[in-house]
Amino acid sequence: MLPELFLLNLILGIVFGFLHRGKEDYTGLLRNGAFAGILLGVIFVLAAQYLPPVGMNFDVGLPGVSGLFIEIILFLIIFILGAFIGDKIEGIRKK
């Protein structure tokens, strides 16, 4: 997978966490972040798989659906980390 997509995913996660309303609601942030992260993961993995240059995906060593599933999970983890970073930045900024 292109490193730019990972960086974009992290930045979108930080923005999501920063703009997420509520007072340090980590459960809601995790639930909403997981939904948004899976959606973005699917979009980014399919975009990297089918847009030119074709086949520029992150090779996890597993072919087919299992490899795509692991790539989506990696995007999910990066997005959720970004969301928590954005939430921490929001908490620091409010003080």
Image (tube, rainbow, N blue to C red):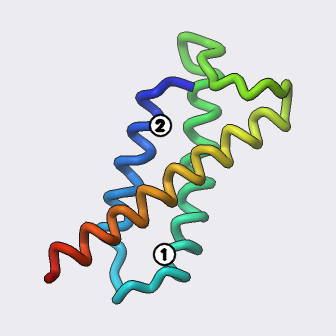
Residue bearing the label numbered 2: 6
Q: Is residue 88 above or below residue 81?
A: below
Q: Position of residue 83 (x, y in %)?
A: 42, 63
Q: CA distance from mark 2 to mark 1?
A: 20 Å
Quadrant where the N terminus is found in the figure = top right
- Counting residues from the N terminus, which is met first, the one under dot 2 or under dot 1? 2
Look at 32% across and 70% down and name the residue there.
Answer: 88
Q: Is residue 7 above or below residue 57?
A: below
Three-letter code for the amino acid on which mark 1 is drawn = Leu
Look at 33% across and 64% down and name the residue there.
Answer: 86
- Is 31 placed left or right of 93 in the picture? right
Look at 67% across and 48% down and name the residue there.
Answer: 73
Q: Position of residue 79 (x, y in %)?
A: 49, 53
Q: Quarter-wise, where is residue 9 in the image?
A: top left
Q: Secondary structure at mark 2?
A: helix
Q: Secondary structure at mark 1?
A: helix
Three-letter code for the amino acid on which mark 2 is drawn = Phe
Neighbourhood count class around disc 2 (C-alpha, 10 Å): few under 14, some 14–19, many 20 upward: some
Mark drawn on residue 39? none
Quadrant where the C terminus is found in the figure = bottom left
Q: Is residue 89 above or below residue 26?
A: above
Residue bearing the label numbered 1: 29
